[in-house]
Image (cartoon, grey):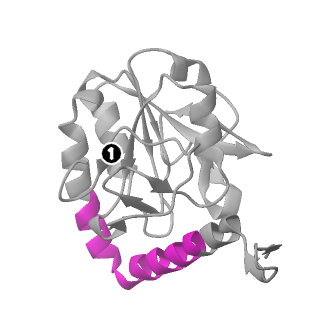
Amino acid sequence: MTLIRNTAGTEAYSADDEMKQKKKALRREIRALRAAHSDEEIHAMSLKVLEQVKALPEYQEAETLFVYVDCKHETETSDLIRQAWADGKKTAVPKVIGETMKFFYITSLENDLEEGYFGIREPYEKNPADEAADREGSLMLMPGVAFDEARHRIGYGGGFYDRYLEAHPGLRTAALAFEFQVKAEVPFEKFDILPGRIVTEKRVI
């Protein structure tokens, strides 16, 4: 941690370090809550999230869905991706390449994914979709660790989604989460990019 001298000449932790520690603690808390739920509970709640997503005007109007591939008891997206295909939409999923994240179209969950960054399934580097992020009719469904009702979001610390959305500011967004991930308040910074909506199994924020 970085120590700074306050006006009294004593040492204190910087505000930046305090922010990092709060985020770290929240990540631990949510990771434990996810682990405490069974696979069946996570699946049942994910299906309820899917129903909420389907009712969103942004989803109904979307031609292309940018959506993460779930991992370690995140809100599941496989059924959502299959629903999007059934609704005639294109789907693109992310791949981490160095310090950047790029999206690629997929047409099969079984054949178009391989194990990638931190064991998360990622698409092969073919059929790039990033150009569609700048067109109307695209919606990003993003993950996160914790949220609050002001739509502040804590991610996993890599900054991939913030950088992607900064590069594609017109892209509509909604974050998927379980209700236990929504807190009264989470630490945030001025430059954080807020999702347009947060969708849980119980409500849309």
Quarter occupied by the N terminus? bottom right
Residue 58 drawn at (x, y percent): 29, 28
- When the figure is inspected, residue 163 is found, relative to residue 58, above or below; the finding is below
- When the figure is inspected, residue 10 is found, relative to residue 89, above or below; the finding is below
Q: Residue at x 20, y 46 (%)?
A: 52
Which residue ends up furthest to the front in the rendered image?
A: 8
* Residue 181 in sight in this render: yes
In reply to whether residue 105 is colored magenta, the answer given is no
Q: Residue at x 27, y 65 (%)?
A: 179
- Give left or right: position of 149 versus 13: left
Q: Residue at x 33, y 80 (%)?
A: 38
Residue 21 drawn at (x, y percent): 62, 75
Q: Quadrant of residue 100?
A: top right
* Prevailing secondary structure of the magenta residues: helix
Question: What amino acid is found at the position of numbered circle 1 in the picture?
Answer: Leu
In reply to whether residue 32 is colored magenta, the answer given is yes
Q: Nearer the viewer, residue 2 or 77?
A: 2
Q: Residue at x 47, y 80 (%)?
A: 29
SS class, disc 1: helix
The residue identified by callout 1 is 80
Task: Tell me which segment is drawn in magenta.
Answer: 22-46
Residue 143 drawn at (x, y percent): 46, 53
* Residue 75 in sight in this render: no
- Give left or right: position of 189 versus 34: right
- Give left or right: position of 30 versus 9: left
- When the figure is inspected, residue 147 is found, relative to residue 111, above or below; the finding is below
Which residue ends up furthest to the top in the rendered image?
A: 135
Q: Nearer the viewer, residue 141 or 44?
A: 141
Report crowding for label 1: few under 14, some 14 to 19, many 20 or more residues within 10 A (C-alpha).
some
Instruction: Say how many tags the image has.
Output: 1
